[in-house]
């Protein structure tokens, strides 16, 4: 089995592969709900799998640290309430081989 090197770039590429949304859009500033959901799930995977601080995640995505912190709180709430969030997270993690 070939080992993949996990990085924020790899997480974004996996999300791109699963959702069909271009990496540029995921990293971009759009506030379209479907893109925001994907971006927030990327933050969560980066936080859990790479053990990055919020400021490091923010730097990778061109965001402010407080925006990432807020998004991580929101994604936890959405994961508890919405099955589609859980499914999307599972698909991204599966694409990454986690």
Image: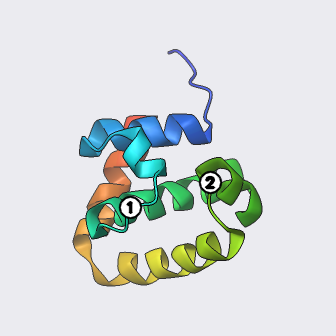
Task: Mark yes or no: residue 97 visible.
Answer: no
Q: Residues within 10 Å of mark 1 (few under 14, many from 20)?
A: few
Residue that badge 2 annotates? 62
Residue 32 x, y percent position in the rendering: 30, 66
State the separation of the CA atoms marked 1 and 2: 12 Å
Rendered residue at 50%/15% (across/down)? 1
Q: Secondary structure at mark 2?
A: loop
Q: Is residue 74 left or right of residue 51?
A: left
Rendered residue at 56%/24% (across/down)? 4
Q: Nearer the viewer, residue 62 or 85?
A: 62
Q: Is residue 77 above or below residue 47?
A: below
In which image quadrant can residue 78 be found? bottom left
Residue 60 x, y percent position in the rendering: 65, 48
Rendered residue at 31%/84% (across/down)? 81
- Of pointers 1 and 2, the one earlier in the residue sequence: 1
State how the image is colored.
rainbow
Q: Is residue 59 left or right of residue 2?
A: right
Residue 88 x, y percent position in the rendering: 30, 57
Q: Residues within 10 Å of mark 2 (few under 14, many from 20)?
A: few
Residue that badge 1 annotates? 30
- State the residue lying farthest toward the top: 2
Residue 33 x, y percent position in the rendering: 29, 70
Task: Mark yes or no: residue 13 visible.
Answer: yes
Q: Is residue 47 above or below residue 85?
A: above
Q: Is residue 80 above or below residue 27?
A: below
In which image quadrant can residue 34 be found? bottom left
């Amino acid at each position: 089995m070939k080992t993949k090197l996990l990085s924020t770039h790899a997480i974004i590429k996996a999300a791109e592969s699963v959702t069909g949304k271009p990496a540029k859009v995921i990293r971009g500033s759009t506030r379209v709900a479907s893109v925001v959901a994907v971006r927030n799930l990327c933050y969560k995977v980066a936080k859990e799998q790479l053990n990055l601080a919020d400021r490091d995640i923010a730097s990778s995505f061109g965001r402010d640290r407080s925006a990432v912190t807020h998004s991580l709180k929101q994604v936890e709430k959405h994961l508890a309430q919405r099955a589609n969030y859980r499914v999307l997270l599972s698909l991204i993690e599966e694409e990454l081989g986690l």
